[in-house]
Amino acid sequence: MAERTIAPGKRLGHRGAVVGLVIVFAMAVVGGLIHYYGSYPPERAATGNWGSLAFPLILATPAVLALLGLQHRPWLLTATGLLLLPMCFLSFSFLFFPLLFPAILFLTDAITRPRSEPRPRAQCPAAFLSAGFVIAAVLSLWAHQDPLTWHTATQSGSVSDVVTMQETLTSLGFLVAAITVAALTPRDGQSTKYAA
């Protein structure tokens, strides 16, 4: 039996996807630090660090989905790449625009990677369901206005919307659901039929 060789394109695609993972994880750390140190101290003291916990988790989840996608789940890589495109606009500045690069890398890897048989039909809807849970996690942070006023010995102020504990826990629940669905998504080459 002839030994199979790995095509150079496959190797390159895999390397590119790994670079994408590093970028997404790095952006999650940067986003969390900016949120933590960018919050006004009295406001942060009044609300807690829930936003500084929620944002990095939301930003890091696509990297976890892509990592699962690299395990013979190309539809998951596709959904993750498409998910990162709107995430570039999570900030009103160009801060998250570097997420465009891993999006392209994940989509390229999904398109060019050779696929094994059988190719489970459930992979596509499961991948997009997983991405939908991530979108729900983002939206749950701004589901409703949370007006907050704070007072210190020298000053006071107010904000129109903050990230509360309940919103963070709801968001975390959606992220856990996204990762769970992704982990249970059948892989290429994996039979979905079980012998009796």
Image (cartoon, rainbow, N blue to C red):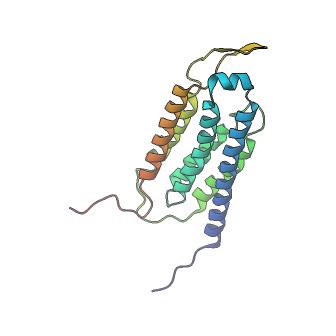
In the image, 138 versus 74, the foreground residue is 138
Question: Looking at the picture, does residue 156 appear above or below residue 80?
Answer: above
**Identity of the residue furthest to the left in this view:** 196
Tag count in the figure? 0
Q: Is residue 60 left or right of residue 184?
A: right
Residue farthest toward the bottom in the current orientation of the protein: 1
> 77 or 144, which is in the foreground?
144
Q: Residue at x 55, y 46 (%)?
A: 79
**Does residue 189 lie above or below 143 as drawn?**
below
Residue 85 lies, with reference to residue 189, above or below; the image says above
The quarter holding residue 34 reads top right
- Screen quadrant of the C terminus: bottom left
Q: Residue at x 78, y 33 (%)?
A: 93
- Quadrant (top left, top right, bottom left, bottom right) of the N terminus: bottom left
- The x, y position of residue 45, in whole percent, is 67, 25
Figure check: 64 above or below 176? below
Q: Is residue 151 left or right of residue 191?
A: right
Q: Where is residue 189 drawn, in percent x and y? A: 42, 64
Provide residue 184's location: percent of width, then percent of height.
Answer: 41, 51
- In the drawing, does residue 35 fall left or right of residue 183? right
The answer to which quarter of the image holds residue 139 is top right
Residue appearing at x 51%, y 60% in the figure: 71
Residue 86 on image: x %, y %: 65, 37
